[in-house]
Image: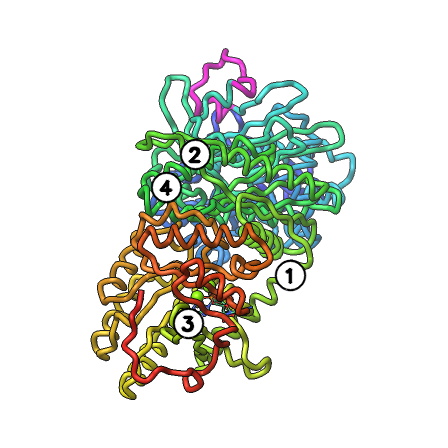
Amino acid sequence: MGGLPATSTTGLVDSPADGSAVGRLDRRVDGGLALTTEVNVGAALLRAQRRFGECRDLTALAEELVTEVHRCGHQRVLLLETVARSRHRELEVLAARGDLLLVAGRRFTGTDLTRMSPSAVVELVPGHPRAPRLAVWGVADASTPALEVLAAAGGAAWRALVATDDARRAGTELSGAQLLLSGALRLAGLGSWSWNPATGVVALDDRLREMLGLDAEEPDPDLDAWRARIHPDDRGPFTGVEDPAAHAGTSAPYPFRVRTADERERTFLGMSVPLATTSTSVVQGLVLDVSAGEKSTGELVRLAQCDSLTGLANRSVLDTRLAEALERATPTDAVALVLLDLDRFKLVNDTLGHQIGDALLRQVAVRLEDAAPPGATLARLGGDEFVVMVPGVSRTDAAALIARDIIRRVRSPMLLPGLPEPFVCTSSAGIAVGHSGTGDELFRSADMALYRAKDGGRDRVAVYDSAMRDEAQARRDAEHRVRRALRTDGLRVVWQPIVDLRRGELVAAEALVRLEDPVEGLLEPKSFVDTAEDTGLIVDVDTWVLGEVLRQLREWRRAGQGLQVSFNVSGKTLEHPAFAHRLAHSVESTGAAGSSLLAEVTERTLIDLSTSTRASLGELRSIGARVGLDDFGTGYSSLSYLDRFPLSFLKIDMSFVRPLGTSERAAAVVEALIGLAHAHGMVVTAEGVETEQQAAMLREMGCDRAQGWLFGRPVTAGDLPLPLPLPPAGP
Ligand code: C2E
Ligand code: MG
Ligand code: MG
């Protein structure tokens, strides 16, 4: 080292031999760096750093550390923030006091250091007022080519250092910085590994070998042997390490269990990062043993970063990685986001129980892991929503291929504990591919695509396109309209007559909702009911309509008039536990006749029949209301669900009624349907009857009731041609 006197201490290094003898890296008058060895900065500092991962009272530990650093004549401590992340809050207190310089961990990974802003680089240059006195740098490993790895790991900071110094002293600085680096790693209690595909070896540093209990003679493991030491459930973050070019790295620390040489299980906290230079391409990893504080630190980190049910990443980890991937992305190297949602998962939970639901989610996670390409990040956002984030995608159809493979794998039958038969679960996926913009924007796009996949019938993949943005806007407008109408008394009910076909008399009226929009005027349900369904606002809409129905019934009753009223009730509304209960209460308290009520439900409701829906339907029946099936023929058109719930009436959809008179087949189908419904004891109503011919044919076939423009369009209550008084003979 140079003979000039040292003027300021730049950094501390320890000797790799035992970790207690520490060197000092000094800045010389001529601007160069000088390394003085054998300066002991104090055992307390070393102990403090080592205990960092295990200590519960971090503030006390950090105080100890800072005191020790001050005692040794230094002013600040810089900690590798990735290690400190779980203790951020406490450390921030120290940082605010100026005792500690917290630098985001990302700066210390290869790719990010090279992207450091110039001002951040300057901060690391010795002599700068904010330059750290004790630095913990990057993830270099003694066995990897020194200059290249340091250039990659230290990147811009290193270049900034050499730029200020004479090229002649570059070598000295480099070895000093290297020593500083390995010393710093040791100080932080970190082990490091690197995987070099060129050599096929996973190089472990001494500290990691120690942590694993490896003998000095034992060679470093190859990739398979290293992976074999890791608990099978915890190998997820290592996905894709085979190919450093494709490995996305793990920007946030992840916990994983490892088997040591003496067959003990330890819990390590690790992170890895791909480092590519012109001549080498490696994956570097840092590891901290958190076994001692596993219940606190390890579990906390696990909870904070992993989805506890499936072990996949959670939302916050995904967000970080997505932001990083987008930062690196280019038009030919873009990021694909696949949002996956299981079809009708709620039904699984409701009918088979949560344990089976959980087992299903775990199996889906395993299938995702099998299907995901190297470098992908898999996450579960909660419920049955999964995400696969794939960097390095050049074309949308490549992403679609991945998504199709995923839903194909999820669809294949799975054995679930407690179920005698293999279970089949379909899923839908929405894809968005992007290379600019924010993660949030990409999420929104993928979400719109997922909506399209669900809306298109589920069990399919949809790729985002710009038209979806307009559709999404239209849905938002509709939602806004419904909310405003609910708030400002903007809903109306119109009534459509239902006649007895044989007697030709009005026997009932169907209550149909309308929305009085201040700008667009009176809107029909087609422009807002679907959105109300999607957003759950339908519960409020149905509740309001029913209130109006009861009010009208009372009014007619007071006037001595009687009429059955049909109302539409969505599956979502029936699902709501309070709905039927409140209805029963209103019927009781207002003295309205429950037997005048006809509740129309759809096939969908009966197919997805959950416990709460069944309870609501039961309650409706208990107040005397009749429950029937609306729009028969538009959905599954299978009467297999009839035995799930006793129905009083069936309405044949207008699509069956319209071809009557022009298609013999349609006539045969309608006739068969009427027979089938009668055999089940149901009263049959034909919808959308517009012509005398249709009415005559239906009458001939034995259809009981009819509704349609032939008998009357939906009108206000006052315009209904009410029978006076007529005790209804209903279904
Ligand atoms: P729906 O229950 O099947 O109601 C019958 C629909 O057919 C009504 O449309 C009605 O105006 C129309 N219609 C009746 N006769 C004829 C005809 O002869 N020809 C033609 N072309 N159409 C006819 P609307 O009022 O637009 O309602 C559409 C759907 O919106 C309803 O179908 C129902 O599914 C839903 N809906 C209406 N009100 C409510 C409500 O309060 N709650 C819920 N959840 N859904 C509602
Ligand atoms: Mg209806
Ligand atoms: Mg209908």
Q: Disc 3 and disc 4: Cα gap in Å? A: 44 Å
Q: Amino acid at mark 3?
A: Ile
Q: In the rendering, which numbered label is found on residue 363?
A: 2
Q: Earlier in the sequence, mark 2 or mark 1?
A: 2
Total residue callouts: 4
Q: Is residue 198 left or right of residue 587?
A: right
Q: Is mark 4 within 8 Å of ligand 1?
A: no
The stretch in magenta equals: 206-224
Label pair 1/4, CB-CB below 8 angstroms? no
Which residue is denoted by mark 4 in the rendering? 357
**Residue positioned 44% across, 85% down in the render:** 719
Q: Nearer the viewer, residue 142 or 69?
A: 142
Q: Amino acid at mark 1?
A: Arg
Q: Quick one: label 4, few (<14), some, or many (20+) residues within 10 Å?
A: many
Taking 23 as reference, is 97 above or below it?
below
Is residue 391 located in the magenta-colored stretch of the structure? no
Which residue is denoted by mark 3 in the rendering? 498
